[in-house]
Amino acid sequence: LNVALGHLGELQREAAERGSPKSRAHVEQLSDTIDDIIGTTEKARQIEFAFDADRRAQQPVDIVPSIREQAEKITQSHPETTVELDLPEQSQVYADWMLDTVLQNVIENAVVHCEATPTLYISVEERGRTVFVRIGDNCPSIPQHEREVLDSRRETQLRHSKGVGLWLTTWIVESYGGAVHLTTSDDGNTVTLELCGPTVLDDIRQALREWL
């Protein structure tokens, strides 16, 4: 990839200086393809960790700071994006360090593939010992072949980072004992992360720590 990026840089400079509009368009398309390959490669590395759930120490973590951090990152990298948050002060879910990967994948996919000015709506709802994180957008409906990634629980097209990202998100959340749900409409898409909250034993441990 480093060699390809080096040649791409030369092509971009040459196309900018004396290339035709058609050649510049081809170079731009090549750049997008290489970026997609890089994104897919990085997600493939993350998949290795997702498969190795037994070695990842899961415990109750507060998801609210992670959501706020990812929302801030996306507005910094894409200043045109608006993020509306409806969050409690805190919300404990059973997860590990890959929770940030889940949130980043869903939020980035919504923004990067939005044809309009992106607006995201992120909320957290607790029902008993289950936590629902909803990430809605104003983007076009996710294509059927992308939705099948969530429905079938397997990735059949590893050629693009978007499909891999959805597949990776599903694998990680299911390794937590949760589930990923997707709803689409003319107004946009909503990805719902269904996550397990702390168990009764976790509550007892926390009470003992506070008592001691």
Image: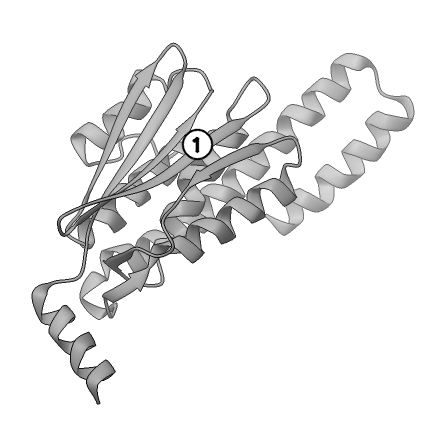
Q: Residue at x 65, y 32 (%)?
A: 31
Extreme residue in the top direction: 186
| Residue 126 image offset from top left, x and y in percent | 22, 46
Q: Residue at x 85, y 30 (%)?
A: 14
**Closest to the observer, 1 or 212:** 212
Residue 29 versus residue 167 in the image, above or below: above
Residue highlighted by disc 1: 121
Residue 71 appears anywhere in the view? yes
Under circle 1, the secondary element is strand
| 199 displayed left or right of 86 | left
Extreme residue in the bottom direction: 212
Crowding near pointer 1: few (<14 within 10 Å), some, many (20+)?
A: some
Please say which color scheme the image uses. one colour
| Residue 79 image offset from top left, x and y in percent | 66, 36
Extreme residue in the front direction: 211
Q: What residue type is labelled 1?
A: Tyr
| 108 displayed left or right of 147 | right
- Residue 136 falls in which quadrant of the image? top left
| Residue 109 image offset from top left, x and y in percent | 46, 33
Q: Residue at x 47, y 20 (%)?
A: 138
| 102 displayed left or right of 127 | right
Residue 153 versus residue 101 in the image, above or below: above
**Closest to the observer, 181 or 201:** 201
| Residue 159 image offset from top left, x and y in percent | 41, 32
Residue 43 versus residue 52 in the image, above or below: above
